[in-house]
Image (cartoon, grey):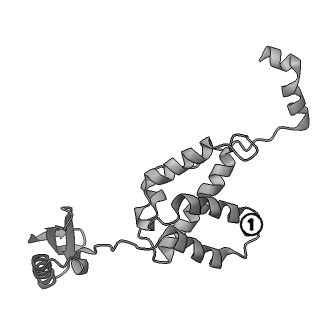
Amino acid sequence: MSVRKEIRKKGVVYVVDYYDPNGQRRRKAFKKAKDANAFDAKVQSLKHEGRYADVFETKKESTTTFDELADHYIVNFQNQKSFNSWKRQILRVLREKFGQRKLSEITYLDLETFRNQRKAIETSAGRTRSEARVNRELAVLKHMLNKAVEWGMLDVNPFKRGAKLLYKEDHGRLRRDQREIARSPLYLRHS
């Protein structure tokens, strides 16, 4: 660790350069040399004692389970119009998948796997599950995990650790005439 003086556009700063417990390089700037030296001494002292939380902002692992989050979610959102019609069904599916898992253990890979499995599983009517339905399930899951972050149950929503997971939906609607043309034997022969 070291303290060095840097000249920047806004003036002189004193930078403390150190490594956190995970080996990540960190830098913190101070306007006064005495503040930088005090911080450097504090870091060295706490590092020697093995207490990182004060300086390194080590995040504690969440012990909240998905079921606990779901209970809080139900209490706060059960009065929505959509809740009793389709959100309750989605919550049942999500609880089956993530139930007793700790929120901090849910990864982006888990979310992507869930999406792909839901698309592959047929509906109770024996049809292929629509991309729109899978998107609704993912939207509820994402909202729940966002609320977990807001409620202090989770540090970062795993949805933010990768690309968008939602399927692209076809929002175009065919008029009745177009549907009839598309089903006609002449159209099928020429396509």
Q: Is residue 64 left or right of residue 125?
A: left
Q: Where is mark 1, residue-wise?
A: 82
**Residue 146, position in %: x, y?**
52, 68
Residue 90 appears at what percent x and percent y? 65, 60
**Residue lying at 15% horizontally and 77% vertically, measured from the top left:** 50
Camera-nearest residue between 101 and 134: 101
Q: What kind of element bears circle 1?
A: loop
Quadrant position of the C terminus in the picture: top right
**Residue 170 falls in image quadrant:** top right
Q: Is residue 166 left or right of residue 2?
A: right
Residue at position x 21%, y 74% in the image: 29
Amino acid under disc 1? Ser
Image vertical order of residue 89 relative to residue 170, above or below: below
Is 164 placed above or below 53 here? above
Q: Is residue 167 left or right of residue 88?
A: left
Quick one: quadrant of the N terminus?
bottom left
In the displayed structure, 113 sits above or below 51; it is above
Q: Residue furthest top?
A: 189
Give the camera-side residue of 89 and 144. Answer: 89
Q: Nearer the viewer, residue 66 or 39?
A: 66
Disc count in the image?
A: 1
Q: Is residue 142 visible?
A: yes
